[in-house]
Image (cartoon, grey):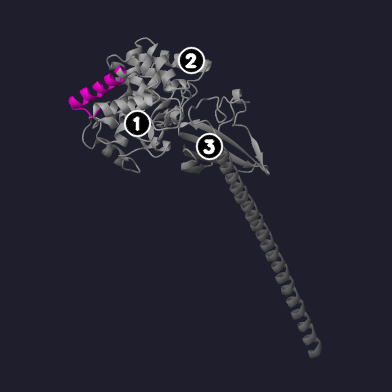
Amino acid sequence: MSTTASSQFQRARRGRGQHGIVLILAVFAVALLSLLAVGITTAVRVELLSSRTALDRTQSLFLAEAGVNQARAMLLYDDPTVDTLQDEWGPDAELPLDLPQQLGDGFYRVRVHDACGRININEADYATLLWVTGDPEAAAAIIDWRDRGSLPAPAGAEQEYYASLPHGYEPRDGPFQTMGELLLVRGVTPDMFFGTEETPGLVEILTVESSSSNLDPNGLPRLNLNSFRNWAEQAFRDSVMARLGSVLTMYETEEIWRGLRDLLQAGQQGYTSLGQLVTVAGLHHTKVAQIIDLVCVDADRLSRGKINLNTAPFSVLAAMPGGSEALAEAIVERRGAAPFTSLGEVSDFLLQQPNGRDLFVQMIDRVTIKSSSFIVESMGWTEADRSFRTVRALVRRLPDMVVIVRQFEQDWPLPPLEETDA
């Protein structure tokens, strides 16, 4: 073979080798670009789904907040002088509030609970907490958590227990801020907190705040009997008769004054309970029932920790100081026939019970028939049903507005509608 032919053959071989390398590189490049395309497409799809989920969650949150605002508006225009389960916001309303309601391309459900229909965990005594928990250790630990050292216990025993936990912490030594805080308390179990099929949970019968307005049925401040501590008898008589003269006689007014004077002379600060009025000589209990809505023994604008006999469930009524299962049954039967519309009706009811006088003295300062605090639960979800958000709010009703005291969001759904609500 000539030199020229050999050179041409070698050049041809090199050309074919280069073409093969180029082909391999081209295939590799195409494969790489395909992988990049798949990766980018997947990333775009993930980002799109993430954005859509975020949008759904945001829409669901706004829908839930719309439910809270609807409840606030309903409470604002509700009669503030009496609250019952049959009110528009109540579970026994003619048109229950807890029904799916459409707003735009989404839905929301909202529930309202009367906070005064629950026991205030920051006000409850040991006997009440023992009743609702059924556990002496848990009842004592709850009180120690909110008010360290209020019950006899080895110094530092509770602090040592909490510090010894895997993720130790300090007890609050102050009022509970949320119901979930109960799960941090020694002896409070999830079953005790959330409840079982047989027993309601603490989350359903306790609250961290409850208040009712200290106003008479006309919306005026009730007459504080202790505000006359430094007044002369004649000034007391004139002021009380001006307000209660249509009910009380002059003699009865003078007897109330003598009761106040005797308490002051005994070193007390005056009347400490409306129940003391039935001990006033010459003041019949029927007259006490007539003035009980018009007078008070403190100057606070809001009364805290009182139980609304119209809205409290059986378990709460039975756990009240002075309460019992028999009394709870009687209250439920009475309000089923007609809700209590005044403390006077409550007084008559209590005084007619066995040992009615003692029951009245023990309970009249702990009960109410109206509320200023409500718990609102609202869940929103989109039409695609890809996401939901639940908002829980503690609201307070004032004369001209309903304000949110505390609000937080959750990913927990509201429990399904009960059969009675369907």
Q: CA distance from mark 1 to mark 2?
A: 27 Å
Judge whether 172 appears above or below 359 on screen: below
Report whether residue 125 is seen.
Answer: no
User: What residue is disc 3 on?
Assistant: 76
Judge whether 150 appears above or below 13 on screen: above
Looking at the picture, which amino acid does disc 1 mark? Glu
Quadrant of res 300: top left
How packed mark 1 is, by other alpha carbons closer than 10 Å (few <14, some 14-19, many 20 or more), is: some
How packed mark 3 is, by other alpha carbons closer than 10 Å (few <14, some 14-19, many 20 or more), is: some
User: What residue is disc 2 on?
Assistant: 334
Q: CA distance from mark 3 to mark 1?
A: 26 Å
**In this rendering, would 188 be left or right of 255?**
right
Mark closer to the chain start, 1 or 2 = 1
Question: Element type at marker 3?
Answer: helix
Instruction: Give the number of the disc on residue 123.
Output: 1
Residue farthest to the top, as pictured: 354
Q: In front of the other: label 3 or label 1?
A: 3
**In this rendering, would 205 be left or right of 256?**
right
Q: Position of residue 251 (x, y in %)?
A: 29, 17
